[in-house]
Image: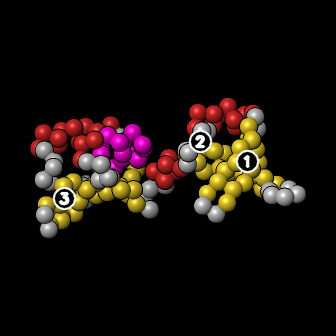
Amino acid sequence: MAVFRLEDSHGGVEVVVFPDLYREAFGILSNDVAVLVKGKPEPGEDAGKVLATKILLLDEVRQRDASSMTIRIPLEQFFEDSLPHLRELLEQHRGTCPLKFELTRENYQVTVRPHPFLRVEPSPELVTSLEAICGEGTVALNR
C-alpha cells in the first residue's frame, strides 16, 4: 500500500493506492515522473483524497491516444542509408496510427502520406528510435 502527494501547477492532492494496484504500478511511481491517476474522490476534513483505481505513465497515455504521427525529416541531416533502418523500424511497430512525413529543405516543405497500409503503434521506444534516426524533436503525436 502507498500514500503519496500528487501535484501539478494548480495544487496537489493525497492519493491512496491499495496493495493490488500498488504492485501493478510500483515500477512507475517515483519523484518527477508524470502520471495519470484515475480514482474516486474521498472528501476529507482539510483536503480531499483520491482512492486510486488506475495509474498510468502520462507519456504512454498521450501516445496511445494519438490519432496520427508526424515525422519531420530535415533532408540536410538525413542520409540515404538511413532509409532501410527507418523502414525496418516502422515495420517492427505496425499498428493502427496513420503516419505523415514532412520533408524539409531550407525554405521548402513537402508532406508525404504513405499508403494507409503503413501504420504504427506509438510507443516511447518507437519515438526514441525514430528520433535517433531523424533527429531529436522530429516526431510529433497528433490528437
Q: Is residue 110 magenta?
A: no
Q: Nearer the viewer, mark 2 or mark 1?
A: 2
- Label whose residue precedes the other's in the sequence (2 or 1): 1
Question: Disc 2, disc 1: CB below 8 Å?
Answer: no
For the residue pair 113 and 15, the one nearer the viewer reads as: 15
Q: Which residue is mark 1?
A: 15
Which residue in the structure is indicated by mark 2? 31
Q: Is 16 rendered above or below residue 7?
A: above
Q: Dot 1: within a 10 Å radius of its alpha carbon, few (fewer than 14), some, or many (20 or more) residues?
A: many
Please give left or right for residue 55 compared with residue 133 in the image: right
Q: Residue at x 67, y 60 (%)?
A: 11
Whether 101 is drawn above or below 133: the answer is below
Depth order, front residue of 45/119: 45
Residue 91 in view in this figure: no
Name the residue furthest right: 45
Tag shown at residue 103: 3
Mark 1 and mark 3: Cα distance apart in space: 45 Å
Q: Position of residue 13 (x, y in %)?
A: 72, 54
- Residue 23 image offset from top left, x and y in percent: 67, 31
